[in-house]
Amino acid sequence: MTDLTQETRDWLAATGFRVGNEQIWIEALTHGSFNGSRNGSDEADYQRLEFLGDRVLGLSVASWLYRASGSHEGQLSQRLNALVSGATCARIAREIGLSDHIRLGKQAREDGGADSDNILGDVMESLIGASFLDNGYDAARDVIYRLWDGELSGNAGKSKHPKSALQEWAAGNQRAMPKYEITDRSGPDHAARFTVAVSIHKVGEAQATASSKSEAEKLAAKAFLEEFG
């Protein structure tokens, strides 16, 4: 049975994670390529813990946003998606030095896997999943709030252009990308009015009218987020 190295155990403790069941943390730090590089090794990798940690992270951040802000649902969703995105998780992973402790196969490490946004973000979530299983929700939430402190108090997800925010919302909720369509144009050229509809498959549609196509698209995206976000 594999043991955590003392270096990794010390790093986890310094980061705020409490290690009880070592095997959970080993699993959280093991990339699928690690097994292929070790003859006959069949240790579990981080994917299941990543799935769990993603949900714990989402609940923790959503709870913080609900208590800290009186914003409407669309704005809350916009900030949530930014705060739990893979890019944010990878950024925090770099800040805490996670890459040195990921168990990667030789080829994956040589290919730069330890600095991959996807891998760093996934392992960050898997560590949250491990914390939840080993120490419970409150402990996992407290670690999240400590590690995400700068992000939560910053501007992530705030004042974003509505079209960008809607695209992020769609991606974060595993929906099709928004489609924009001019449904009406009226008035003379010097005072034209454009009506634009934005839709997302199996979610819904919103419309807005403005004096330019780009402004109508922006207002339509904003209306969509307010209704469905």
Image (cartoon, rainbow, N blue to C red):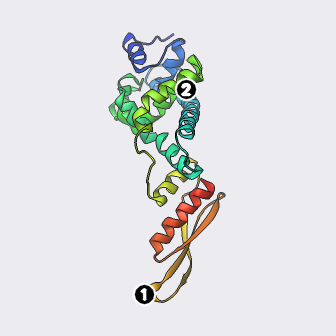
Q: Mark 1: few, some, or many residues within 10 Å (few <14, many ≥20)?
A: few
Instruction: Report x, y in % for residue 124.
Output: 46, 30
Q: Residue furthest bottom?
A: 188
| Residue 13 figure quarter | top left
Instruction: Report x, y in % for residue 65.
Output: 53, 40
- Name the residue located 41 percent from the left edge and 21 percent from the top edge: 15
| Left or right of residue 195: residue 4 | left
Q: Mark 2: few, some, or many residues within 10 Å (few <14, many ≥20)?
A: many
- Name the residue located 49 percent from the left edge and 18 percent from the top edge: 26
Badge 1 amino acid: His
| Mark 1 or 2, closer to the camera | 1
Q: Which residue is mark 2?
A: 129
User: Can see residue 45?
Assistant: no
Q: Nearer the viewer, residue 228 or 173?
A: 228
Tell me if residue 32 comes above or below residue 216 in the rendering. above
- Name the residue located 62 percent from the left edge and 55 percent from the top edge: 228
Q: Nearer the viewer, residue 143 or 68?
A: 68
Q: Which residue is mark 1?
A: 190
Disc with the residue nearer the chain's start (1 vs 2)? 2
Badge 2 amino acid: Gly
The answer to whether the residue labelled 1 contacts the one labelled 2, judged by CB atoms less than 8 Å apart, is no
Tell me if residue 101 comes above or below residue 175 in the rendering. above
**Considering the numbered disc 2 on the image, is that residue within a helix, a strand or a loop?**
helix
Instruction: Report x, y in % for residue 193.
Output: 51, 80
Q: Nearer the viewer, residue 121 or 205?
A: 205
**Considering the numbered disc 1 on the image, is that residue within a helix, a strand or a loop?**
helix
In whole angstroms, how far apart are the C-alphas of marks 1 and 2? 58 Å
Tell me if residue 159 comes above or below residue 99 in the rendering. below
Instruction: Report x, y in % for residue 152.
Output: 45, 37
